[in-house]
Image (tube, rainbow, N blue to C red):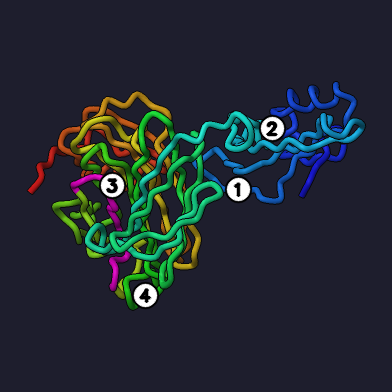
Amino acid sequence: MRTVISGFHALRPLALATAALLCGGAAQAQATGSTAPVVDFSSVRGSGISQSDVLMENVRLLVPVPNPFQPGSTTTVETAYNLIFRFDPATLHLVPVGLTQTGGEGAQLCATANVTVFDAVRGAAAPLANASVTLGNQTLQTNAQGQVTFTHMPSSLYSISAVVGSYVPATQPIALSCSTPANVAIALSPSSPTSGGLGTGQFRVILTWGQNPSDLDSHMTGPGATPADPRWHVYYSSKQAGGICGLDVDDVTSYGPETVTCPSTGSTGALRPGVYRYSVHHYAGSTNMGTSGTSVRLEFAGGQQYRFTPPPANYLGSGDVWTVFEITVNSNGATSIAPVNSVMNNISSGSVRSGDATELAAPQFGSAENMQLLRGLSKP
């Protein structure tokens, strides 16, 4: 789709926002007496990059300028941009909040990204070779170690995608900077239940991050079977608690993945009605979850996917707990999802277990794990 900037009355809301961000170029072109610039959406890739933001990549601005070699004619100068829009719940509009140039004159091609693609169920022991990884306008194939490197990239926020046979495709955001190479992992679920893929009634949570912190831990709590055991907790020392969910992978050496499947991978069980709450704990390593490319992907058997990124918060590093979301399972098996997106600091040893009968009898929907109920745990 191509939209002429001067025809504002015909623009759709996204195009209007794009035109507003690029109006400086439009004014300059019209001042020369040439025809109006054009915003070209024909090569745009759009994706959600957080709970509130949408990224549009490769929006092209075509600006006619006088051709100095053929007086009376024009030539076209092309630049490309990545734009971020944020949903405003008050107006129900997408509002532009970010713009970076990724192509054309003046674009700095100085960033590098190192990407590794893994099997989400088997983790770092199972890198995926020959996966097609797309970043910006480049698509490369992973080597035998599941790795691929992108060089000479513009500094910007992107959505990176990975596709390989017998696995469910996935995307996640990645921020590239000219100062430091970006190191990220993408973990893909097998597409067939016979090889670890999701079956009817299952969901899976996949956590990945960068080189630092060295160890982020997944914690899933859920409804117990009896009042005496009102709530179970799946984590690195209790990988099959409660008889429902299971921790497929516990990674302690950067990148991930850490993968939790409910009901457990290969299980024929069913989800118990109640609230399932997922959190991430910064167990060890430098930097923090908010600056390390941390990404949580929630997948359902029908192909539905949700992606979560850490919210703006006061991260202190080791000891931070990010309560990501809750899933409520009704008695008829229907599910509803509530993003929690709450960050707590200085939680000892990574426990997010809830064990108080009063809170567990009627857990607060859409809330963080109760800090008063956290118990210190140590690595085995």
3D distance between C-alphas at marks 2 and 3 = 38 Å
In terms of depth relative to the viewer, which is nearer, 9 or 51?
A: 9
Q: Secondary structure at mark 1?
A: strand
3D distance between C-alphas at marks 1 and 4 = 30 Å
Q: Which residue is mark 3?
A: 255
Left or right: where 134 falls relative to 112: right
What range of the chain is rendered magenta?
252-266
Q: Secondary structure at mark 3?
A: loop
Can I make out residue 231 in this image?
A: yes
Decide which of tag 4 and tag 3 comes sooner along the chain: 4
Point out residue 242 in the picture as x, y percentages from the top left corner: 22, 60
Decide which of tag 2 and tag 1 comes sooner along the chain: 1
3D distance between C-alphas at marks 3 and 1 = 25 Å
Decide which of tag 3 and tag 1 comes sooner along the chain: 1
Which tag is nearer the camera, tag 2 or tag 3?
3
Residue sitting at x 41%, y 40% = 112
* Image vertical order of residue 223 relative to residue 285, above or below: below
Q: Secondary structure at mark 4?
A: helix
Decide which of tag 1 and tag 4 comes sooner along the chain: 1
Q: Secondary structure at mark 2?
A: loop
* Image vertical order of residue 160 relative to residue 24, above or below: below
User: What mark, if any, has residue 173 been given in the picture?
Assistant: none
3D distance between C-alphas at marks 4 and 2 = 43 Å
Q: Amino acid at mark 2?
A: Thr
Residue closest to the far front? 69
Q: Which residue is mark 4?
A: 193
Q: Which residue is mark 2?
A: 91
Point out residue 110 in the picture as x, y percentages from the top left corner: 46, 34
Q: Which residue is mark 1?
A: 46
Which tag is nearer the camera, tag 2 or tag 1?
1
In terms of depth relative to the viewer, which is nearer, 46 or 377?
A: 46
